[in-house]
Image: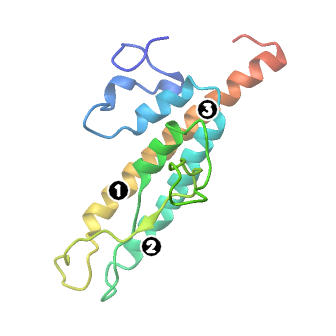
Amino acid sequence: MEGPGSNHTLCAGVDLERYPTEDGDHTLMFLHKVIFNKTKIPALNAVLDVTQLRQRVIANNIANVATAGYRKQDLRFQEYLNSFVEKPAVEGTLTDPRHMPVPKPIGAPEVYEPETGLNDTDLNNVDIDKEMTDLAENHLHFNVGARLLSCGFDGLRKPITGRTG
């Protein structure tokens, strides 16, 4: 199978050439990596979980666009996906500060308040246009993850049922 940059598409019609893989959004590259990984179903499930959480965070920002003093929240979405792909072979905790650091297990994605100035209304730092763009982008990420997860289940189902097509 060929990877990004080829003229091939993944199942469900997801064209890898349509998505940036260098100096841009690496979400599809993440999805591409997990397709060829033995743990693709749990990883794709994590994509759905994190996009669901991000949906709630963005919806909360939109709901509070006119709330004075509200601080926009965001999710470290890309960092979480990258940490899932680059999962360390050994996970552990540091028991003594003099010991060599051991990678920590992957936890839940971090919700944080980005440092941005006030919006045009001077009420808070929520930019409704940016939130709507983030919402649409998150929706696309969820749909791609759901389609690829469906393909993963189809890939498991075919050998079990003895069907090849």
Check disc 3 and report its element: helix, strand or loop.
Answer: helix
Gap in Å between the C-alphas at discs 2 and 3?
30 Å
Q: Which residue type carries mark 2? A: Asn
- Name which of mark 1 and mark 3 comes first in the sequence: 3
Name which of mark 2 and mark 1 comes first in the sequence.
Answer: 2
Residue plotted at (38% across, 80% down): 64
Disc nearest the viewer among 2 and 3:
3
**Label 2, label 1: how far apart the Cα atoms are:** 13 Å
Q: Position of residue 149 (x, y in %)?
A: 61, 35
Number of residues whose C-alpha sits closer than 10 Å to that of mark 1, classed few (under 14), some (14–19) or many (20 or more): some
- Residue with the mark numbered 1: 134
Q: CA distance from mark 1 to mark 3?
A: 25 Å
List x then y, in percent, for residue 55.
48, 60
Depicted 115 relative to depicted 81: above or below: below
Considering the numbered disc 2 on the image, is that residue within a helix, a strand or a loop? helix
Kindly identify which numbered label has been placed on residue 40.
Answer: 3
Where is residue 49 shown, x and y percent of the image?
58, 52
Of the numbered discs 2 and 3, the one sitting upstream in the chain is 3
Amino acid found under the numbered disc labelled 3: Lys
Q: Which residue is mark 2?
A: 60
Residue 23, quarter of the rendered image = top left
Residue drawn at x 47%, y 28% is: 32
Tell me where residue 120 appears, x and y as whole percent.
Answer: 16, 77
Q: How many numbered dots are placed on residues in this image?
A: 3
- Rendered residue at 42%/65% (across/down): 58
**Kind of residue indicated by mark 1:** Asp
> Which residue: 59% across, 35% down?
89
Q: Quadrant of residue 37?
A: top right
